[in-house]
Amino acid sequence: MKFMTLTTSIVAAFTFANTAMAATSADLILQGTVSVVSEISVAANAGSTSLNIRGGESNKLVASVDETSNNLLGYKIIISSPTGGELRHTADASKATSYKVRYNGASAVTPSTSGVEVKNSGSLAGLQTASSTLAVDVTAYDLAPAGTYEDTLTISIQSNN
């Protein structure tokens, strides 16, 4: 009986000690995550497929671009061309004329195969969509042989780091 009383006393003392050490407050972390949004869409104007190769073009509007981002550091727009800024004859690529692009009214630049930065938004306060214009300057090729001349521009959006 003495052994049982002693055991009960020890268990009671241990339980009382643990209860006395319980916290009076606790923290709960609430958290959510928003993924980075970097989206671009391009709407071609009718002028993009009716360029004047023989007479050339100056600041001809060829597309409207919508850029969407929520990156606090902002984003940049990069334009690249597999030909490095040449409209090439589809049957004979040696027949070509050069062109430059103007993004959102900025100075004309030649698109490169690796890409050229044409816009940097700077910092953003949150999700934003901006609309920009894309125009081209085409060098006149007066002696151009008949046929279709083309190039493909890749316009990409990249989050600033």
Image (spheres, grey):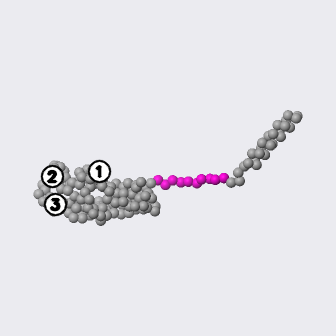
Q: Which residue is mark 2?
A: 95
Residue at (19%, 50%) from the top-left corner?
A: 90
Categorize mark 3 by other alpha carbons within 10 Å: few (<14), some (14-19), many (20+). Answer: some
Does the segment drawn in magenta span residue 90?
no
Q: Is residue 139 above or below residue 18?
A: below
Name the foreground residue: 9 vs 126.
9
Does the segment drawn in magenta span residue 33?
yes
Q: Position of residue 81 (x, y in %)?
A: 26, 52
Numbered tag placed on residue 140 in the rendering: 3
Q: Secondary structure at mark 2?
A: loop
Q: Is residue 64 above or below residue 88?
A: below
Evaluate whether residue 59 shows in this view. yes
Numbered tag placed on residue 114 in the rendering: 1
Evaluate whether residue 47 shows in this view. no
Residue at (51%, 53%) from the top-left corner?
A: 33
Q: Main secondary structure of the magenta part?
A: loop
Q: Position of residue 161 (x, y in %)?
A: 41, 54
Identified by mark 3, the residue type is Ala
Among numbered discs 3 and 1, the one appearing first in the sequence:
1
Identified by mark 2, the residue type is Lys
Among numbered discs 2 and 1, the one appearing first in the sequence:
2
Q: Which residues are magenta?
A: 26-35
Among numbered discs 2 and 3, the one appearing first in the sequence:
2
Report the Cα–Cα distance between label 2 and label 3: 13 Å
